Image (cartoon, grey):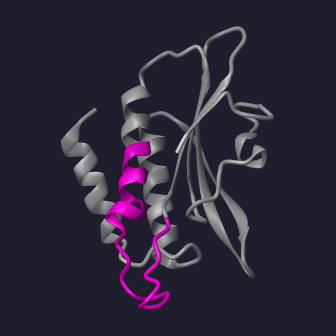
Amino acid sequence: MSRNAFEADLDTLIGFHARRSTGLEFLAAVEWACGELSTAGYATRLETVPMGTGTTRKLVADRPGTGEQRELVIVAAHVDSVNSRGGPSSPAPGADDNASGSAGVLAIGRALADHTGTHDLRLILLAGRSRACSAAATTSPACPRSSATASVR
């Protein structure tokens, strides 16, 4: 893993100043991350998911394993950040909540991009702050599984 790449990703994510789950900067951050993981060789997709009275997006990036009896390993972080005092359009760069976690998912993704693993790997960047990866978040055509063997958040 590269410290410089991690810090660059962190700076980029912090640059999306108001990452409220349904806001334009959140969507731009998720789309940027999608491009990064796609470039690293992952099968990526953006999913529209309900959020309150509206919708938001979730990034899912898959890399299938090579084992005969594969399990699913999930690495996830929430991308959104909220300025509770300032309101939805106020700056909320959220280096610790949670740009650092999102940058960590990207770093792990890049570190494992060329690794041929036994198990399927799924990277997820989502909204909803403390939402766990549910079974609904862990299924996909690329890596069909009803539950995860391991989840890192």
- Please state the horizontal and vertical placement of residue 67, each as a whole percent of the image: 64, 10
Residue positioned 58% across, 60% down in the render: 130
Which of the pair 130/89 is nearer the observer?
130
- Residue closest to the eye, 59 or 77: 77
Hey, which residue is sitting farthest left in the picture? 4
* Magenta run includes residue 81: yes
Q: Measuring 38% from the left and 77% from the top, which residue is drawn there?
A: 92
Quadrant of res 10 = bottom left
Range shown magenta: 80-105
Q: Where is residue 139 in the image (x, y as percent from the top left)?
A: 75, 40
Answer with the quarter of the image where residue 121 lies.
Answer: top right
Measured from the top left, where is residue 8 in percent x and y? Answer: 24, 53
Is residue 104 located in the magenta-colored stretch of the structure?
yes
Viewer-proximal residue, 71 or 26?
71
Q: What residue appears at the point 73 percent right and 48 percent down from the top-left corner?
A: 134
Residue 34, compared with residue 75, is above or below; it is below
Q: Which residue is drawn at 72% across and 11% down?
A: 69
Note whether 86 is above or below 115 in the view shown. Answer: below
Q: Position of residue 101 (x, y in %)?
A: 41, 51
Q: Residue furthest right?
A: 146
Residue 145 lies, with reference to residue 96, above or below; the image says above
Residue 147 sits above or below residue 48 on the image: above
